[in-house]
Image (spheres, helix red, strand yellow):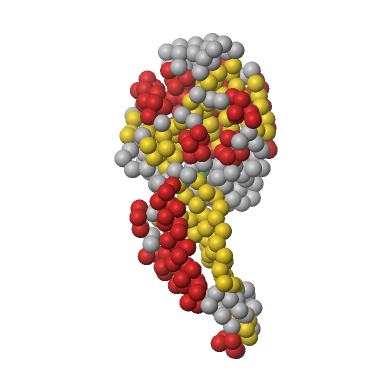
Amino acid sequence: MEIYTGIIMQKVIAEKDLVNLRRRIHSEPELSAAEYKTVDILLGFLSKHKPQEIIKKVGGQSLITVFNSFNEGPCILFRVELDALPIAEENSFSYRSKNTGIAHLCGHDGHMATLLGLSALLSENRIKKGKVALLFQSAEETGAGAKQVLNSHELKELNPDYIFSFHNVPGFGKANIIIKDGVFAFASKALTIKLFGKSSHASDENAGINPAFAMSRIILKLNDERNNLGSSVSVIYANLGNKSFGTNASSAEIGITLRNKSDEKLVEFSNKIELLISDICKEEGLIFDFNYSEEFPSLVNDKECNKIIAKAADNVDVPLVNIDNAFRWSEDFAYFTKEYKAAMFGIGAGENHEPLHSSTYDFPDEILNDSVRVLFEIVKDFDMN
Ligand SMILES: [Zn+2]
Ligand SMILES: [Zn+2]
């Protein structure tokens, strides 16, 4: 089977070549902000397809290539992610991760391969108006990469009129296109809570202040708040004391993630959580410290972009699914939606496909072909050929 351009029906890249490319990227995963080898693999492919511009190291490790007609017209940008996760892969197939403790378990390998497929189509079918930019964004998983690209002079100069992104989504039929107007993915932030008590000899526990009890109370209290105000809170880790049996524990650290579909409600919720924790710490006589990181705003889709995506799905003849509720996960593409006309859509990875970030996750190669075609139909909607 080959990838065709739809109406033009021109054979451009064999599906097996795209699959091999995806698997090669899968086997060499790299962590957020350290995607050096990944960028090399991409450049090896992209340079053959002769975009007019290749811009390296945009706001860090991100890469942008531009197909430029040098004529008036809109600038359309497609964005995918470069990074893998700090999780050990438990697959046994030949293209499993070569890098210990790191794996492409969010399907970013498949997103990159899709954009490479689009670059092959754009190379064969040169646009005559405007520009099409392909952004391979670093450090999505930590929430750092989008902001760095948005602050870069390269993106400001490009000043895209429309930005599109997509994510593979397990639980939906293969290559179904999933859209939603308004909030598409939740806002979230990580909160690190540090508790400081007082150490003492283990035989004289009353002389110390052990944070174990406050820690237990905080975790139980967070459990009560799990579904408050449409918010959610998950305990990510909890550490207490050291393995030193003669000493009463004196410090603890708890890491939690807070979520809400509204940026404002998330602030309200985190203020409430801070208050609950500080009350417990005061009662237990502990000093405490809060630190926020990995903050993602809510991802709000543009209606006009969604119409274009829906039309593209129709042209490719893949099912379109309009979802009622936003996804509870977060995406740093949200930052793009705050500043530009932009939308993210989902591509179904299969109804029974494993969940994202699971240790045996693997992007389904069967959806590559349709994914490329949907992106190309989006370009065609702008009448640039
Ligand atoms: Zn992820
Ligand atoms: Zn992802």
Which sits in the foreground, 265 or 49? Answer: 265
Position of residue 50 measured from the top left corner of the image (x, y, whole percent):
64, 18
Which sits in the foreground, 82 or 104? Answer: 82
Q: Quadrant of residue 176?
A: top left
Position of residue 374 measured from the top left corner of the image (x, y, whole percent):
43, 24
Residue that appears at 41% across and 34% down: 301
Q: Quadrant of residue 17?
A: top right
Q: Is residue 342 above or below residue 91?
A: above
Position of residue 214 measured from the top left corner of the image (x, y, whole percent):
49, 74
Residue that appears at 60% across and 12% down: 70
Q: Count the marks.
A: 0
Q: Is residue 359 left or right of residue 44?
A: left
Residue that appears at 42% across and 13% down: 7
Residue furthest bottom in the image:
203
Residue 362 visible? no
Residue that appears at 35% across and 53% down: 230
